Image (tube, helix red, strand yellow):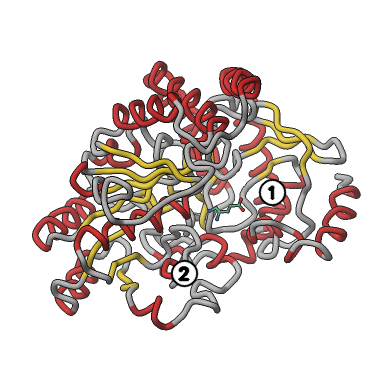
Amino acid sequence: MNIEKSVELFNKAKSLIPGGVNSPVRAFKSVGGNPVFFEKGEGSKLIDVNGNRYIDYIGSWGPHLFGHNPPFIKEALEEQLEKGVSFGAPTELEVKMAEIITRLVPSVEMVRMVNSGTEATMSAVRTARGFTGREKFIKFEGCYHGHADYFLIKAGSGALTLGVPTSPGVTNGNAADTLLADFNDIESVKRLIQANKGEISSVIIEPVAGNMGVVPASKDFLQQLRNICDEEEIILIFDEVMSGFRVAAGGAQELYGIKPDLTTFGKIIGGGLPVGAFGGKMEIMEKVAPAGPVYQAGTLSGNPLAMAAGYAALKHIEENKEEIYSSLEVKSAKLEQGLNENLKSLGRNFQINRVGSMLSLFFTENKVFDFKTAVSSDTELFGKYYRAMLERGIYLAPAQFEAVFVSTVHSDEDIDYTIKAAFEALKEIL
Ligand code: HOZ
């Protein structure tokens, strides 16, 4: 495949942008090779600057549930463009957005719009601290909640991929308030609570972790977490930046039937534009400024263009729920089954974790249920697989510790082609 223009652009970018990219995983450091620079997205495809077409399984890291540029989001954006792109003042769209979020996710009684998942998680933790008057919080090893200082401690995603799960620049003071538990291990949570009695404000978790690859929490574990948080008056925060509106219209909390106190959103909520949100119980959210004293603000928060795209996406979900999630399930199950059959016929028992349209293939024969089992995956082999798939026109997330996202516009042909390409790629590298 000729990617000459991407090579030229990356070389130029490296002298102008740190590492040549605006977000680390995109630099292909862990998989090797030159990052592909893109020009266009069309449904399930991405077209690079050399005109090569790829079946895209990143979907902008999750938001493109309906593929690139769906007509209903495009129309909403065009309509808003005529009216203006930013007012820094309230609009009716923000009210409609809050209404639809609270309808789709009933644990969210009140919601504040922000600009990214990182803003959502850091504001949620601050709100929980303000509400409880306690400073410490618990996060899980391998979960990633954006790049606020106190989250970059044994974090997943790019931090893990680049080998800096605990980032330089995070002060000891910041790190001291972050307590680390093991994913899917309730005893590790109990021990921390016991050792820090009355000092823990919140527990934040990705109920379907997507940043150490896809690793779902067990229902029993989440239920026990809910119970302990109730007993100890600790705020339970579900980070649904990835799973929100993806694994079900009401997110992972609908799937598991467990209600958190606060939820954070991103990705799909902006229909592809930079949006995040946090929300939850009224009594907690009423602590947020200006209703309450916990400060939180942003000029671009509730931006009309972003709200128009996000509202169009959520409205589409609300009106077509059954169809959307059953089609995603059918397509994703077909992909999972095809990959499993490939592995079987090659005599390998590598693990595939899947929740709805989020999936990861781990190059390990161990069951993957937490950070330690996730990192037992052979990342070098993943790199080879990645390059072999790219060569065949399949665009996966360029790191083992991310997810594959299937959209409603991936066709049967796309999935069949992907399974065939994966067979050839695996045969080549194993
Ligand atoms: N950490 C992001 C996904 N988990 C990567 C986002 C990006 O590079 O765009």
The location of residue 352, given as percent across then percent down, is 47, 49
The location of residue 412, given as percent across then percent down, is 59, 24
Q: Residue at x 45, y 52 (%)?
A: 210
The residue under label 2 is: 149
Amino acid type of disc 1?
Ala
Label 2 vs 1, first from the N-terminus: 2
Residue 406 showing in the rendered view? no
Amino acid type of disc 2?
Asp
Above or below, comparing residue 96 to residue 9 in the picture? above
Q: Residue at x 22, y 39 (%)?
A: 257
Is the residue marked 2 within 8 Å of ligand 1, measured from its CB?
no
Q: Quadrant of residue 291?
A: top left
Q: Quadrant location of the C terminus?
A: bottom right
Q: Residue at x 11, y 63 (%)?
A: 232
Left or right relative to 377: residue 223: left
**Looking at the image, which is closer to me, 425 or 355?**
355
**Looking at the image, which is closer to me, 424 or 255?**
255
Of helix, strand and loop, which one carries label 2?
helix
The residue under label 1 is: 425
